[in-house]
Image (cartoon, rainbow, N blue to C red):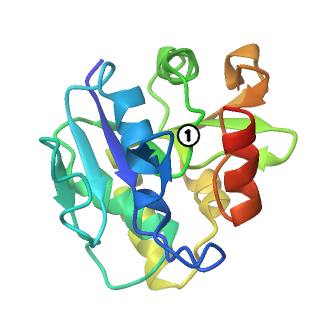
Amino acid sequence: MDISCAILAGGASSRMGIDKATMVINGKSLIEHVYDSVKGIFEEIMVISNNTDILNNKKVKVYKDIVPVKSTLTGIVTGLIHSRNPYVFIVACDMPNISDKGIRYILENIRGEDIVIPKVEKGYEPLHAVYKRTCIPYILNLIEKRNFKISNLFSFLSVKILEDNPFFIKDGQSIFININTQEDLLFIKRND
């Protein structure tokens, strides 16, 4: 199946106070950790960011948000519009624990749905999920209405929910851990 990957790196990082994507853990930026995890799986990898030099040492296309609205939905729809494939695996730039097995498990569960999304105890993981280009008009409609909750797409589209699974754990930690605060960063560094 032809699937692209879009790494979202356009968040404001307001809780962190600095650009999370370029923060360094073990000699590599957070976004490089994510890129290195996905490069063996996907032929087409994009970065959605207003910083066009974010991965300047890699041969990766960087796209700016297609609309001037700060929201996760904006990043998702930008990746879908620029993708040359019908499906896009969307992942946040601040998820250093993502795993090859976890990503492949999600991809192997696509059976034509518009969205394939993990759900764990804490809730849905929309920034570690697969979206089909059929989502584009529905996402644009939500953005226009200033309705940025991703789960509001679910009633309009076919959605496969992947309940908690051993593939969602790597080295005893959730693959969905993301870095939002200095405490999160210290936790990752301590357990790395």
Other residues around mark 1 within 10 Å, as few (<14) / some (14–19) / many (≥20) = many
Residue 133 seen in the current view: yes
Q: Secondary structure at mark 1?
A: loop
Residue at the spot 26% in from the left edge and 70% down from the top edge:
51
Residue at the spot 49% in from the left edge and 18% down from the top edge:
100
**Quadrant of the drawing holding the C terminus:** top right
Q: Quadrant of residue 10?
A: bottom left
Q: Is residue 80 above or below residue 99?
A: below
Residue at the spot 31% in from the left edge and 65% down from the top edge:
49
Return the residue nearer the eye: 170 or 150.
Answer: 170
Q: Is residue 183 above or below residue 2?
A: below
The residue pinned by badge 1 equals 96
Q: Quadrant of residue 83?
A: top left
Residue 89 seen in the current view: no
Residue 93 image offset from top left, x and y in percent: 46, 51
Q: How many labels were placed on the picture?
A: 1
Q: Residue furthest right?
A: 121
Residue 117 image offset from top left, x and y in percent: 61, 37
Q: Is residue 116 left or right of residue 67?
A: right
Q: Quadrant of residue 164?
A: top right
Residue 147 image offset from top left, x and y in percent: 59, 78
Q: Is residue 92 left or right of residue 66?
A: right
Q: Which amino acid does the dot numbered 1 rest on?
A: Pro
**Quadrant of the drawing holding the N terminus:** top left
Residue 106 image offset from top left, x and y in percent: 55, 23
Q: Is residue 191 left or right of residue 26?
A: right
Q: Residue furthest left?
A: 59
